Image: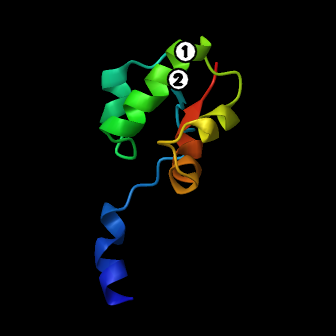
Amino acid sequence: PETFQKILPFIIIDEKPQTKLNINNISFKDLLRHPYFDYESTKAIINARKKIGGFQSLDELKQIPAISDSLYNRVLPYIGIN
């Protein structure tokens, strides 16, 4: 409790809605910048997107072998399809 009271003046809560990454339009380089996507998963997503001409549903990411269920669940709040 004492530590929390000391740091409380420095805590800022940003209530603006997060802008989701459009998985159909994002560049390889920009997707790779996201902390949850490594080189292999980024490459797999971009290659799958090129192959199918764009994702219709985020569930399609589950079909990519490089995207594990845990990765999918972690990134879901940060990605979208427009």
- Report the front residue among 61 and 63: 63
Q: Residues within 10 Å of mark 1 (few under 14, many from 20)?
A: few
Quarter occupied by residue 52: top right
* Residue occupying the point 30% across, 23% down: 29
- Residue placed under numbered mark 1 in the picture: 51
The amino acid at mark 2 is: Ala
Callouts 2 and 1 close, C-beta under 8 Å: yes
Percent position of residue 5, x then y: 35, 80
Give the left or right position of residue 53, taking residue 12 as reference. right
User: Residue at image x 52%, y 23%?
Assistant: 48
Query: What residue is pinned by disc 2?
Result: 48
Q: Residue 20, position in %: x, y? A: 54, 32
Between 12 and 41, the one lying in front of the other is: 41
Q: How many marks?
A: 2
Q: Give the percent coordinates (x, y) of residue 43.
A: 38, 28
In space, the residues marked 2 and 1 are separated at their CA atoms by 5 Å
